Image (tube, rainbow, N blue to C red):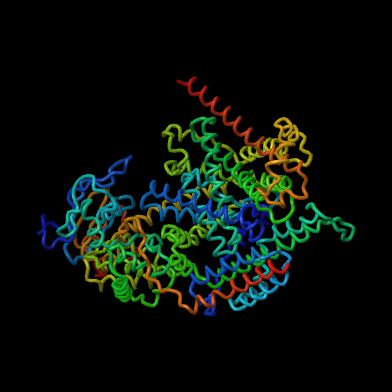
Amino acid sequence: MSVPAAQFALHVPDGLLTPVVALATGVISIAVLAMALKQSGNELKDKQVPLAGLTAAFIFAGQMFNFPVAGGTSGHLLGGALAAVLLGPSMGAVVLGVVVLVQALVFADGGITALGINTLNMGIVTAFGGYALFVLLRKVFPASASGVVGATSLAAGFSVILAAMAFSIEWLFGASVPVPFDTVFGAMVGSHIAIGVGEAVISGLAISAVLAARPDLVYGARDLDRAQLADRRKVSGRVFAGGAIAVTLLMAVVVSQFASDSPDGLERVAEDNGLLGEVTDHTFSGGFFADYATSGVGNETLSLAVAGFSGAILTLLVGFGIVRTVAASRNSASS
Amino acid sequence: MTESAPSALTSAVSVRDLTFSFASGDPILNNLSLDVERGERVALLGPNGAGKTTLSLHLNGIHEIQAGSVSIGDLHVNEDNLAEVRRRVGMVFQDANDQLFMPTVREDVEFGPANLGLSPAERTERANEALEAVEATHLADRAPHHLSGGEKRRVAVATVLSMHPEMLVLDEPTSGLDPAGRRELADLLVTLHLTQLIITHDLPFALEICPRSVIISNGSVVADGKTADILADTDLLAAHRLELPFGFDARRAQ
Amino acid sequence: MSAGHTANLFIPGDSLLHRMAPEAKLVSVVLFVTAVALTPRQSVWSFAVDAVLVLVLLGIAGFRATQVIARLAVVLPFIAFAFLIPFIAGGEQTSVAGFNLSIEGLWGTWNVIAKAVLGTATSMILAGTTAVAALLRGMTRLRVPAVITSIIAFMFRYLDLIVGEMGRMRTAMTARGHDPRWLWQAKPIASSAGAMFVRSYERGERVHAAMTSRGFTGSMPELNTAKASGRDWALAAIPPLVAASGALAGVLLV
C-alpha cells in the first residue's frame, strides 16, 4: 500500500480550493513554465523536445514505482528536486509540469481546475525551491561528488516540505471549508515529513548512481572537475537513511515550534513583533484571506499563523546569512 | 576491390582519410577510406567498437568531420548542405524504438517529408507510397510501440524511403528479429533499387543480400571484396572477432 | 509496482464520445468542471443533475461501475480529510451521536466530496474516450504550443519502454533475493533509478540523432488535422450548459 498522504500535496482534486486560487495559481504556473520553457530551449536548442520527453517519461515511471518505507509500506518519488539537480531548475519544472498535466488529462489524477495548484506545488515549487536549497547547501558542503549527493538529498527532502507549505499558503487564500490555517499547515507539513525522508534518501542515492555512471549529465555538478567528481564516498543505505531521519527529527522540532497546537514559541514571536494586536485589527480583518481560513477560528490563531510565517522567513534569512558567512570564510581561508 | 579512385559520376559514397575521436580518448576512425558505387549493396562487418556506427553517422552529417572528407554523390558533406545530405542518405538506426518516435506510424513516416518542407498533400502521398513499398499500409494508424519487431523494422525503413533517398544506411537491421521477420526484411531490401550500406554481425544475411563486404577493425578498412570470398577466409574472420554460424559453409550457401 | 493510479484509462470503442473531436471534448470538460466548481454547495439539486449527467456519460464511454469506483479511490485521502472537517472546523456546532460537529464543517465535507468526485469522474470520461494521439491533436488545435504537445508525445512514446526496463531491473533484483521492507534497504532501487535516468537520457540523445538524420532542425512539423464539426461543438456544449444552469440556479435561489 502506498502512503495516502503522499498524494495529498500531489494531486489536489477539483473544488478543494476556491476558484480564485485555482485561477491565480494557473496564471502563475503558466507564466513561470513559459519562462522555464524559453530558458531550457535556449540551453538545449533542438535537443529540448526529445530530452524533455524522455526525462518526463523517466519521472513519470519513477512516480509509478514504490520504494519501501517501513515494515512493508511504501511511498513513491515526487522527483521535482531530483529533476532540477539533473536537468537544471527550468527544465526540471517543465518536465514536472508536463507530468502533472498528463496525469490530470490522461489518468484523471488531480483535478483539471486544480491544474494550476498542482503544477505550482509539485512542479514549480519543488524544482525551483529544491534547486535554490541545493545551491545554498552546495556552498556549505565540500566541492565534491559527496557534497552534491548530500546537497541533493537534503534539498529533495525539504522540497517536499516546501510543496506542503505551498499548499498550506494556498489554503490560507482559498480554503473551501472552515479548517484553520494552522491546523492545515501542521497536518500537511507533519504528514509530509515522512515523505520527505523517503524523497531525500531516494534522490540522494539516485544522484550518486548517476554521478558514478555519467557525471557529465548532472546539471548541478557542472562546476566540478574530474578529481572532485571522483571524490564520492561510499555510503550505505543504512547510514544514509539514518542521517536523513536525524535531520528530519531536527526539522520536525523546528517546525513544531511554529505549528504546534499550543505554540508558545510562536506566541512569543508574535508578541515580540507586535503582531498580535495590530495585524488582526487592521490588515487582515478585510477580505484578503479566505474567510474560511480565518472566520470562526479566532483572530489570535490567525495572527499566530502570520507570525509563524514571518518567523519562518526570518529563520530562513538568518540561515542564509550564516551559510553565506561560512562560505565566505571558507573561501578566504582556502585562498 | 582494388580499383582506386573511382569516377565521381558513379560513386554513391566516397570517404577519404576520415579520422574521428571523441573529446577524450583514442581515435574511433583512423584514416578510413571507402568507396561505394551507385546501386551497390555493401555489408559493413567488424567487431564491436570497430567504428562502423561512427562511420555511418558521418555519412549523414550527424558527426562533424574532424579530418578527411566524405562525399555523397557529387556533394562534399559540410555545414551548408546538411539538409540535402540528410535527404540523400536514409539512416535506419539499430534500435527501431529510437527511430520511431511519433505517436502514429503515419506521422512518423511523414516526419522526414515535413522537414523537407513538403505540403500536407505531398506528405500523405509520400507516406502512402513508402508504406506500400514495405507492405505496411495496414499499420499506418497504429502506435509504433504496439508493433512487432519485424513490423517496426519495416516501418523504420519506410520513414526514410518517404524522403526519396539515394542510399540507405542500415545499422544492424536483423538484431532482435525473429527468423520470419528477418526473412521479410531480406526480401524487402533486395527489392529496393537503392545504394545500401548494411552494418551487421549477421554473416549469412550479409552473404545473401550483399555481393560485396568490407571489414572494419580499429577504425580502418582491413578487408574489402566479394562477400563469399571474405566469409570463406576463416583466419581473417577470426582475427576480427567474426565467426560463421556453426555448420554454415559460405561456399556451399552460394 | 503499485501503479494503480497511473493505469491507462482509455477504453477502445466507437461511442458518440469516442467519435467527438478531441478539442471539443477538452473544452467541454474544462467548462463543465469549472461550472461544477462554481456551484454553491447548498444547491444540492444542481449537483444531483450534474451527477446524473456524468453517470450517463460514463456509461456511454463504456466504463463499468467497478472501474469507476476503483478509480475514485484516487481522491480517497481527500475524502478522509473531508470527513475530518466537521470535527475540527469552527463555527456553529450541532450534536450528532454525542459528537460536536460544525455545521459549516458538514457543508464543507459535502462540498469537497461532491466536487472532487464529480471532477474525477469527468476527467475519467475524457481519459476513457480519448486516445493520447487524439488528445494531442486536440491540444494542437486549441493552440497549445507544439513544444508542449511534442514533449508529451515523446513521453508517452517511451513510457512503456522505461517502465518495462524498470520492471526487468526489479525482477532481476527479486530473482537474486532482494525483498526490501525498510527505507534503508532501498539503495538498490534508488541506484537503479539513477541508472534508469542515464539510460533515458542516452535514449533521448539517440532519438535526437534519429530526428536530425531526417532533417529535424528544432521545430516539430505541423500535423495534418481535420477540424471539429459544428455538430461536435453543439454536443460538447451541452454538459457545460447544464452545469452552468445548475450553478446559476444555485446562486439565484439559495
Q: Is residue C185 among what the camera can see?
A: no
Q: Quadrant of the N terminus of chain A?
A: bottom right
Q: Position of residue C93 (x, y in %)?
A: 84, 56
Instruction: Look at the picture and state if C81 lies above or below A234.
Output: below
| Residue at (48% x, 31% y) in the render | A143
A246 lies left or right of B131: right
Exactly how many numbered labels are in the figure? Answer: 0
Q: Quadrant of the C terminus of chain A?
A: top left
Judged from this view, the residue extending furthest toward the right is C98
| Residue at (41% x, 69% y) in the render | B104
For the residue pair C148 and A146, the one nearer the viewer reads as C148
For the residue pair A122 and B95, the one nearer the viewer reads as A122
C3 lies left or right of C231: right
Instruction: Look at the picture and state if B106 lies above or below B19.
Output: below
| Residue at (64% x, 60% y) in the render | A13
For the residue pair B6 and A132, the one nearer the viewer reads as A132
Q: Position of residue A129 (x, y in %)?
A: 55, 42
Q: Position of residue A166 (x, y in %)?
A: 62, 47
Q: Position of residue B108 (x, y in %)?
A: 37, 66
| Residue at (62% x, 36% y) in the render | A313
Q: Is residue A155 among what the camera can see?
A: yes
B64 lies left or right of A195: left
